[in-house]
Amino acid sequence: MSKQTICIVQCGQEDWSKQVTAEKISLVHLHPSQIKDFAYQQQSSDNKDSFEALLLTDDTYPQDVLLLEQCSEVHAVFYLGDLATKNGATQLFLKRKLAQAITGSPEEVLHLLSKVAFEGQYGAKLNIRDMKIAKPFLYRSHYDGNRWLHFDDLNLSDFTPIAHFRYNISHDYQKLLSIWLEKRASAGLSVQLSIRHLPNGGVDHFINHWIISPEELSSPIDLDLHQSGYLTVTILAKGRGHLSIGPLHYRLSRGDFGTFLLGGERLCDHNGREIMTYFDPGDWQPPLNVYFSGYRPAEGFEGYFMMKKKGAPFLLIADPALEGGGFYLGSQEIEDKIKAAITSKLRLLGFSHDQLILSGLSMGTFGALYYSLDLQPYAVVIGKPLTDLGTIAKGTKWGRPGEFATSLDLMQLLFGELNEQALEQANRIFWDKLETAGQSQTLLAVAYMKDDDYDSKAFTKLLEKGTSFYARIIGKGWSGRHNDNSPAIGKWFTRQYDDLLTNDFHRSDHK
């Protein structure tokens, strides 16, 4: 079977493969009376990932439907109609797999699944430095680090091209493509995107042209291409005022069924600040493991297989801001949404806060530490801690010249300026919150580098000040700079996690 082929198991009385031919889909029919045999074959097979999606097309199913739980992926079970309201076994199966409803004719359903049920994830961005201003002598503009390209005092009577991206976006027609532009504009100014589709091998012949309206640009928009090729993107503006243009994000889309992965969720505040989450309930038994992604220029989730292997419920949190993440900080709105994403999953699972573990590496350590002060988890497990964000930014000049310059953009993101006052404020974000957090029963486990060139005093300060909140602090250090011994950090991080699962939560399925 080609890697481009998606295998879908269609479970129902009627065999769709006899009436529908869908491109890029291998459709396997499973009669409800054969569920037991199918489930046994899947569990005894060496190929546990033999199909990408399970599609339930009947109104009712026998008790045997529960046997499909062990051989189907969470969020990748789809059902038609009002199946979720049927018998108890079916309801339980749909709930435990977080199944998703899908509508349409057999042809429409299979076409949609062929676009969204692919393996893996992909996301990237075109940065403002990749942008060419249309008439630099006519439009007054300036850069704000790598965060914004500002156009001052625009006065345009009609939609007029003001800039375009130098590089094209390559895309495979077999998947949906999500496009989203970061921007801020004065009240009297509107923005459009012009997207032209050049086929593979083409030079000057465009086969599609989309105009993305100002209203559509308020959220990501999906493009369904019918031919592979390249997309050129031009920014147009109309009206009078100030315009700030940020990166253009492009991602393989799951349509209405998720962000990056099936079931992934996009959190967003009124300014367009994004945070992504992905939840897998595992075996529905404690604890809930939350992992904050580290610095990641490629957009998407980190740590999926590491957390999946542990067997327990887990929540991945990713930050696509700036070059590789914005340290999970922003407006009160987005920070509240991050906390709500975690507490809502605890409620769904029926867990309490002492059945929660927060974790992360490098940039992700700040997210785990920061939100632990509100959530009071059972434990926080981190590697290469970063707490003083101003110190990290200052280090780009003297400590590690030119390295991790995105920390300078972080100051602009948080405070709108880059000066000594902003650096000092950034250093106080975590510690000021710690001072008012009170005492908890949380365990803090830290793997750190003794000569860390990003934040050399993080572990020392956690020992000195952290006992006001954390009940116990344990740590292990290695000689070297921040990135000198990531394998040792990762090994210790994993061992602490496994010890917690074995000794404190009496789990043995994570090894």
Image (cartoon, rainbow, N blue to C red):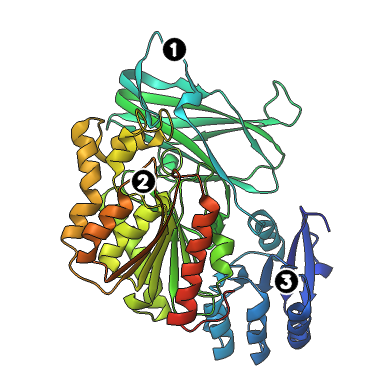
Q: Are marks 2 and 1 in contact (CB under 8 Å)?
A: no
Image quadrant in which the C terminus is located:
bottom right
Query: Number of numbered discs present?
Result: 3
Instruction: Compare marks 2 and 1 and give the one earlier in the sequence.
Output: 1
Front-most of residues 362 and 244: 362
Q: Name the residue under label 2.
A: 273
Circle 2: element type: loop
Instruction: Compare marks 2 and 3 and give the one earlier in the sequence.
Output: 3
Name the residue located 46 percent from the left edge and 21 percent from the top edge. 163
**Depicted 283 relative to depicted 258: above or below:** below
Circle 3: element type: loop
- 365 vs 374, left or right, is right
Is residue 68 at least partly visible in the picture?
yes
Q: Which residue lies furthest to the front in this view?
A: 479
CA separation, marks 1 and 3?
A: 56 Å
Front-most of residues 128 and 83: 128
Q: Which amino acid does label 1 sit on?
A: Lys
CA separation, marks 2 and 1?
A: 29 Å
Name the residue located 71 percent from the left edge and 68 percent from the top edge. 49
Disc 1 versus disc 3: nearer the observer: 3
Is residue 256 at least partly visible in the picture?
no
- 4 vs 372, left or right, is right
Q: What residue type is labelled 2?
A: Arg
Q: Position of residue 464 (x, y in %)?
A: 23, 58
Q: What residue type is labelled 3?
A: Lys
Q: Name the residue under label 3.
A: 48
Q: Residue furthest left?
A: 436
